[in-house]
Image: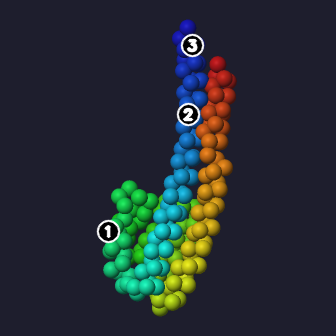
Amino acid sequence: MSGAVFRLTAAVLLTVGGFCVGEARRQKLTARRRALEAVLELLTRLRQEIAYRRTDLNRLYAVLAAGCSPGGPLEKVFRDAEGFGQMQPPSTLREEEAACFAACFGGLGHADAKQECARLDYYRERFDGFLNQAREEEQRSASLDRRLGLAVGAMLGLLVL
């Protein structure tokens, strides 16, 4: 009897594990989308501040870092850097997105206001494209990841039985 209980327990654990793997993938996609949204909001705010107020970037960085929401996608980015040029991309971004983030913030503050605004417009368009792609991917896999994970886990569970 203990062998049957062991097999049944293994089957249930494999099924639940498959579901959890699918859920983890879905959460990763959601975290990426939220990080891209936060970067886009930051770029929009930077452009407004530079275009209309011509705010000093060091002072602006301090204001934005202080106003960053705790637990938000950019909290660690602001906390670990002392200025825009030292910001590291959020870990949830993909390689191409992270490279774009590094290029954008690494080059900030080396031109006049008009050129900075043009650069920020360019990067906003790039991140808007990344965000649209992330939303599409997240929508496609909305419940599919969990179902596929559950199905794979159930199939492995049946093999154990």
* Residue placed under numbered mark 3 in the picture: 3
136 versus 67 height, above or below:
above
First in sequence: mark 3 or mark 1? Answer: 3
Q: Which mark is residue 66?
A: 1
Which quadrant holds residue 118? bottom right
Determine the secondary structure under disc 3: helix
Identified by mark 2, the residue type is Gly
Classed neighbour count for the residue bearing mark 1: other residues with Cα under 10 Å, few (<14), some (14–19), many (≥20): few
Classed neighbour count for the residue bearing mark 3: other residues with Cα under 10 Å, few (<14), some (14–19), many (≥20): few
Q: Look at 37% across and 61% down and name the residue there.
A: 69
Is residue 154 among the parts visible in the rendering? Answer: yes
Q: Look at 67% across and 24% down and name the residue there.
A: 159
- Please provide percent x and percent y for residue 26: 57, 47
Identified by mark 3, the residue type is Gly
Is residue 80 among the parts visible in the rendering? Answer: no
* Residue placed under numbered mark 2 in the picture: 17
- Please provide percent x and percent y for residue 35: 50, 61
- Please provide percent x and percent y for residue 19: 58, 35
